[in-house]
Image (tube, rainbow, N blue to C red):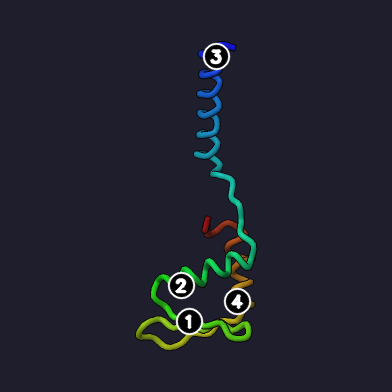
């Protein structure tokens, strides 16, 4: 094949991919629960909160506020009902 023909095929493929991404979005690779949980905890810590995990209970303390406690079940529900259904992108 000539270089011009190959270049034209590459340009067409790139155009088709751009159309696909623009209209249907990029393919999403979801994280496993453990990776997602660790990413979420690190994100909360990076925003200035103090996080303690004791026996599947997560205590989050924001500066100037009272302690908030969450069960591991709360995070599992968030993972299944929000993250896995694509309502919030993380990666």
Q: Identify which residue, 54 or 66, lies in the foreground.
A: 54
> Which residue corresponds to mark 4?
74
Q: Nearer the viewer, mark 4 or mark 2?
A: 2
N-term-proximal mark, 4 vs 1: 1
Q: Badge 2 local density, few (<14 within 10 Å), some, or many (20+)?
A: some
- The secondary structure type at the circle numbered 2 is helix
Q: Badge 3 local density, few (<14 within 10 Å), some, or many (20+)?
A: few
Q: Are marks 3 and 2 in contact (CB under 8 Å)?
A: no
Single out the residue that lies furthest toward the bottom: 66
Q: CA distance from mark 4 to mark 2?
A: 15 Å
What percent of the width, then of the height, locates residue 5? 55, 14
Q: Are marks 4 and 1 in contact (CB under 8 Å)?
A: no
Where residue 56 sits, quadrant-wise, is bottom right
Residue 60's disc number:
1
Q: Are marks 1 and 2 in contact (CB under 8 Å)?
A: yes
Q: Are marks 4 and 3 in contact (CB under 8 Å)?
A: no
Q: Residue at x 63, y 72 (%)?
A: 76
- The secondary structure type at the circle numbered 3 is helix
N-term-proximal mark, 3 vs 2: 3
> Which residue corresponds to mark 2?
44
> Which residue corresponds to mark 3?
5
Q: Is residue 1 left or right of residue 4?
A: right
Q: CA distance from mark 3 to mark 2?
A: 52 Å
N-term-proximal mark, 3 vs 1: 3
Q: CA distance from mark 1 to mark 2?
A: 9 Å
């Amino acid at each position: 094949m000539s270089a011009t023909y190959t270049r034209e095929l590459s340009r067409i493929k790139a155009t088709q991919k751009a159309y696909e991404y623009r209209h249907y979005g990029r393919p999403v690779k979801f994280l496993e629960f453990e990776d997602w949980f660790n990413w979420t905890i690190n994100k909360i810590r990076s925003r200035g909160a103090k996080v303690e995990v004791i026996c599947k209970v997560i205590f989050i303390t924001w500066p100037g506020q009272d302690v908030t406690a969450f069960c591991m079940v709360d995070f599992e529900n968030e993972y299944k009902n929000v993250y896995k259904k694509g309502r919030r992108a993380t990666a």
